[in-house]
Image: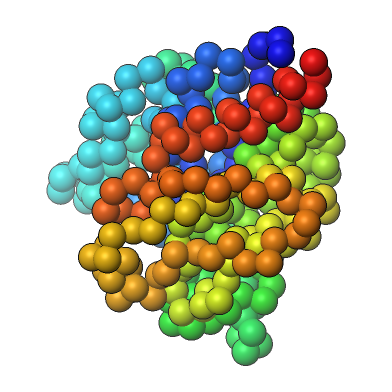
Amino acid sequence: MRLREIEVGCIGGGTGLPSLLGGLKTNPWLQVNAVVTMFDSGGSSGVLRDQLGVLPPGDILKCALALARNEAEARRVLLSRLPTLEHARLAGHTGGNLLLSMMEQHSGDFLAAVDGLRALLGCRGRVWPASVDQSSICAEFSDGSRTTGEVEVDARQREGGSVRRLWLDPPPRLHGQVADAIGRFETAIIGPGSFFTSLMPPLLVGGMAEALRRIDGPIILVANLLTEGRGMNGFTAADEVRWIGEAIGRPVDVVVVNTAPPSEETAARYASEQKHPLPLGDMPASCEVVEGAFWDGPIARHSRRRLSYAIWSVIARRLLDHAA
């Protein structure tokens, strides 16, 4: 085996993608990039989107912080929420969300704002928005009902709505610079993160599927630890693989699946929220399954270290052993 640096693209959002990035950035053989969902309608990001007309900054900010040179200090400062101020519209937002929104308004270019934030934080890796077009998540459920917006889709799932179809409206396009960046990826990693509101939306951006199909290396999915509400009862890792394969028009090559059950107390707490460990399901024969104990503590989050080692083992075997 001959070691060399490998260009990696990580796609998704929410709390799962930053955890993956934070683990991978410590590997000196990986050039890490994040392609982040831009369709957040909740919390501080949603309010800034409505009030200032800017793109929702929250997921981009969290991924940039995960790649920061001094992540702990950057998170302490930029994830702190501002107290009530003279300008009440600014109260309750995180400092980082406001900073990124102000940089976008000043430059008039969201990509330039993200790159400026990356330079300020000394990020080891690049962060790209999946699109710079304003758009919203739309879902149709098994009973024929429809809803629009990340928060609303999540709420319907919790109540028992089973997603039958997902799309973005108005249809956004992949920015040319982002398409060029994806063209340099040797492999793509999707997830972990809320499946229908963090992982699927960036894959539905116009031009994304075509860009991913041009990647020569493997498409790797990090399966979620839990289902998300009554609407995902019976949902499996194999279902995630099928949804993603259909969205991008090429199969998922490898899925990374957790085998470590949470403690009884933790499982009961999540069960009260109608969230249950994600079963493997009937996996397509073409998809390699990599299993391991990734659950880390009382919160449903992958162990950064274990996940990063598992991803590296797949990449090294698929790209370096094969090349040798």
**Is residue 80 something one can see in this rendering?**
yes
| Residue at the (43%, 45%) spot, across then down | 294
Which residue is the extreme one toward the bottom? 143
* Quarter of the view holding residue 137: bottom right
Residue 151 or residue 287, whichever sits in front: 287
Residue 32 at x, y percent in the picture: 57, 25
**Is residue 21 something one can see in this rendering?**
no
Residue 111 at x, y percent in the picture: 58, 30
Residue 204 or residue 172, whichever sits in front: 204
Q: Is residue 104 above or below residue 265?
A: above
Q: In this view, does 59 lie to the left or right of 207?
A: left
Q: In this view, does 192 lie to the left or right of 297?
A: right
Q: In this view, does 197 lie to the left or right of 252?
A: left
**The C terminus - image quarter:** top right
Residue 154 at x, y percent in the picture: 47, 69
Residue 11 at x, y percent in the picture: 60, 42
Q: In this view, does 159 lie above or below 151?
A: below
| Residue at the (58%, 28%) spot, across then down | 312
* Quarter of the view holding residue 4: top right
| Residue at the (46%, 79%) spot, across then down | 230
